[in-house]
Image (cartoon, coloured by chain):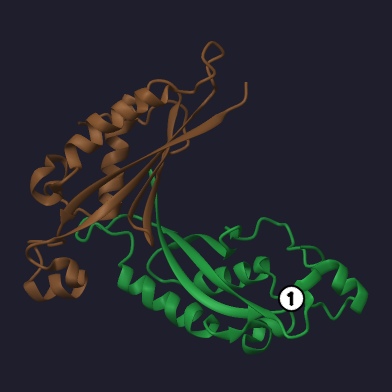
Chain colours: A green, B brown
């Protein structure tokens, strides 16, 4: 039997989908209104799943206080109430599609010392969600929504 | 035949407290925080149970949801609903009734009862922002954990 512990977090941020590798027309075709010059925002919902043995002394895979403070420090604090394109260095060179935001969050969380990171799922809206479980050999697509 | 997953959701309300008698009072407080409050506290647990299998050609069903509902009633609701999990659920005695341990008990209770299709996932929400998923080991057939 395998157990995954999943915790949900929230952050609100703005972004603009725009690739310097594309012309103005191509950007508009690829990203539509997500390419509007001043960006726009979302209430993101982040799900973080971790696994590991359940400590018999505590009944826990990981103490939630440890998970919460780690996620707060490496993701929520730098991602909440910011313009992702400018305020998070990784997105100065990478389009902050929710695919890429999801991958960036995974990379930041994989260093959690108390359990194994299994999955990052990110809801951009209640209708769109993205999941990343580590490198599967596929490259994220930046050219299309 | 195509393999299909079906999921049934039930809710139960229960109280619990986290306390390890091997810890000092200070350790209990440090590790468990307010979950260590001596009289406990409660949650509205939401349980999602997923069974996977081939629909029976005669009925079009993997498992009759009525049957699954009845199993959930007998094994989970009657055992856990409106109970203090530490004191009233014998299978949890000697364990901290965390979401991990409750989900794992639910798996062990349900797995031997699912005779059509296979139990694929138990997802237990303690709050809307915290849940545990329990999966099988991915081997065919029962994992042999039938202890009640």
- Residue identified by numbered label 1: A95
Foreground pick, B143 / A97: A97
Residue A126 shown left or right of residue B40 in the figure: right
Badge 1 crowding class, 10 Å Cα cut-off, few under 14, some 14 to 19, many 20 or more, is many
Residue B50 shown left or right of residue A15 in the figure: left
Image quadrant assignment for residue B92: top left
Task: Write down the chain letter for disc 1.
Answer: A
Foreground pick, B11 / B63: B11
Residue at position x 63%, y 72% from top?
A101
Quarter of the image for the C terminus of chain B: give it: top left
Residue B120: % across, % down: 45, 36
Residue at position x 67%, y 70% from top?
A100
Quarter of the image for the N terminus of chain B: give it: top right
Q: Secondary structure at mark 1?
A: loop
Residue at position x 10%, y 76% from top?
B26
Foreground pick, B128 / B140: B128
Residue B129: % across, % down: 38, 62
Residue A4 shown left or right of residue A118 in the figure: left
For residue A50, above or below residue A3: below
Residue A78: % across, % down: 53, 85
Q: How many marks?
A: 1
Q: Name, please, the residue furthest toward the bottom.
A: A87
Residue B42 shown left or right of residue B129 in the figure: left
Image quadrant assignment for residue A32: bottom right
Residue at position x 51%, y 33% from top?
B5
For residue B119, above or below residue A23: above
Residue B72: % across, % down: 29, 32
């Amino acid at each position: 039997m395998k157990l995954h512990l999943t915790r949900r977090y929230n952050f609100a941020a703005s972004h603009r989908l725009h690739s310097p590798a594309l012309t103005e027309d191509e950007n508009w075709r690829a990203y539509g209104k997500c390419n509007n010059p001043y960006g726009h925002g979302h209430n993101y919902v982040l799900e973080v799943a971790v696994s590991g043995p359940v400590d018999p002394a505590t009944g826990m895979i990981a103490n939630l206080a440890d998970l919460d403070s780690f996620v707060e420090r490496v993701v929520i604090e730098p991602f909440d109430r910011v313009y992702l394109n400018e305020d998070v260095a990784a997105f100065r060179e990478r389009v902050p599609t929710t695919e890429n935001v999801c991958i960036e969050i995974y990379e930041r969380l994989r260093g959690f010392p108390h359990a194994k990171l299994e999955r990052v799922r990110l809801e951009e809206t209640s209708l769109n969600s993205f999941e990343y479980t580590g490198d599967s050999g596929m490259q994220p697509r930046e050219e299309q929504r | 035949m195509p393999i299909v997953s079906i999921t049934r959701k039930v809710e139960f309300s229960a109280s619990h407290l986290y306390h390890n008698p091997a810890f000092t009072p200070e350790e209990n407080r440090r590790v468990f925080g307010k979950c260590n409050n001596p009289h406990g506290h409660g949650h509205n647990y939401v349980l999602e149970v997923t069974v996977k299998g081939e629909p029976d050609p005669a009925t079009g069903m993997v498992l009759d949801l009525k049957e699954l509902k009845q199993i959930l009633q007998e094994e989970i609701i009657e055992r856990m609903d409106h109970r203090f999990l530490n004191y009233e659920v014998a299978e949890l005695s000697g364990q901290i009734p965390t979401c991990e341990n409750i989900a794992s008990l639910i798996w062990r209770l349900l797995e031997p009862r699912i005779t059509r299709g296979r139990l694929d996932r138990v997802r237990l929400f303690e709050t809307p922002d915290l849940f545990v998923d329990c999966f099988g080991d991915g081997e065919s057939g029962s994992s042999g954990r039938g202890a009640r």
